[in-house]
Image: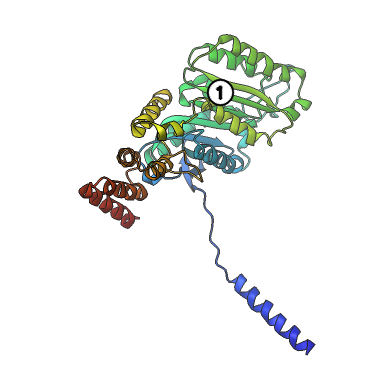
Amino acid sequence: MKNIKLYWILIYYLLTGNSMAQVADTDYVIGKQLFIKSAVLNEDRQLLISLPKNYDNSVHDYPVIYVLDAEFLFDVTQSIVKIRAERNYMPRSIIVGIVNNTGKRNDMSLIIKNKDGREFFGGYGGKSKEHVKFLKDEVFPFIESNYRANSHRTIIGMSPTFGPVLEAFWNDPKLFKGYIILASELAQYTKNGKSIEEQILASVLSGNHSGNALYVGKASRDLLNRPPEEAEAYITLNTALKKLNLKDFKYNIEVLEEEDHYGMAVSGIQHGLETIYPKDVWNIPYKEFRNAKNPAKTLKQFYDELSKRYEFNVIPNEDAFYFVGNLSGISRRLKSNKRYKELVEFLELSVNYYPNSATLHKRLSEAYKSINEFEKAELSEKKYIQLLEYR
């Protein structure tokens, strides 16, 4: 009898185990990857591209974040941007990662030396200008002709790959609006005999950085292996910039405590994005919007001002992860409060922002019915059905 029980127990586990083994799996994709042939670098380069949520629902252009060292930094940048944008701390953005070719990462480094003449990157590098040209002449035109990308660009580089970031900051400052430098060096000297700290300050003093933002971060544990002047450079650069009392140039020069060389990337990217998109500016008052006498007008005025400040069309989020601070959240509140006239006006504005959103057209159709605008309701319903069929 005992043997029979063991037999049936074994059969049960074999059957259930087999059914588990047959569960289908699929790939989880967070972006696109492609190769472009670079005449500037004389090689093929791999690009990773992440488009923002609801990209197909809108028709407007998005800011772009260019990420060097993409094989290491692309995924984490994509996650940080996703969370920050969902919570209205920054606009949803296109992310473009440039993957390093094998053995080519150090090509991007600046030729820098310490005060005693010892080369920092072991004599490698010196091609930062070529990589800026590659971005400007080949990557930007490709991205901007194939995706709805605007001219508000941010660049992220780390350790050797901060070379093109500084190269652009010094010599072509309007190429990017945001400059994020991770695991940086400030006390090393470039070929012109000036330290990186001195060149950053001179570039800011040139007056060519109006509207720009700069983040420079270093891990505290790196300073254990650096001469004292490296830590001092972070203090003196901050002091010099503070004295300038700059109104139209945002910066954050910092040492991140208890972080190591590459481990500081997560905090550094976050702080860099906060420098470009400060929380005091990106404090979106959605409670004020929904309680306003005219919610649509109040929201539009706020985003028009934000767009003017950043010189591109900033639009509110259509929806977000368990969050009411967006168009869908406000429309739900207006409906629950039976403010149907305001709801219609608000949803009419919403479909202007997201004309390809089936969800918003469906809600607008229902809102029209609430105020007995049945012809308009029918048109919105037809648009809703068309968008569903298109998908």
Between 253 and 357, the residue placed more toward the observer is 357
Residue at 49 percent across and 29 percent down: it is 282
**Residue 308: image x %, image y %?**
39, 24
Q: Which residue is mark 1?
A: 214
Image quarter of residue 200? top right
Q: Is residue 86 above or below residue 110?
A: below
Q: Position of residue 176 (x, y in %)?
A: 48, 26
Quarter of the image where the N terminus is located: bottom right
Give above or below for 337 relative to 387.
above
Q: Quadrant of residue 351?
A: top left
Q: Residue 230: image x %, image y %?
A: 72, 20
Work out whether residue 40 can be spotted.
no
State left or right for residue 269 relative to residue 61: right
Residue type indicated by callout 1: Leu
Is 272 positioned to the left or the right of 256 in the image? left
Q: Residue at x 46, y 22 (%)?
A: 174
- Quarter holding the C terminus is bottom left
Q: Nearer the viewer, residue 269 or 118?
A: 269
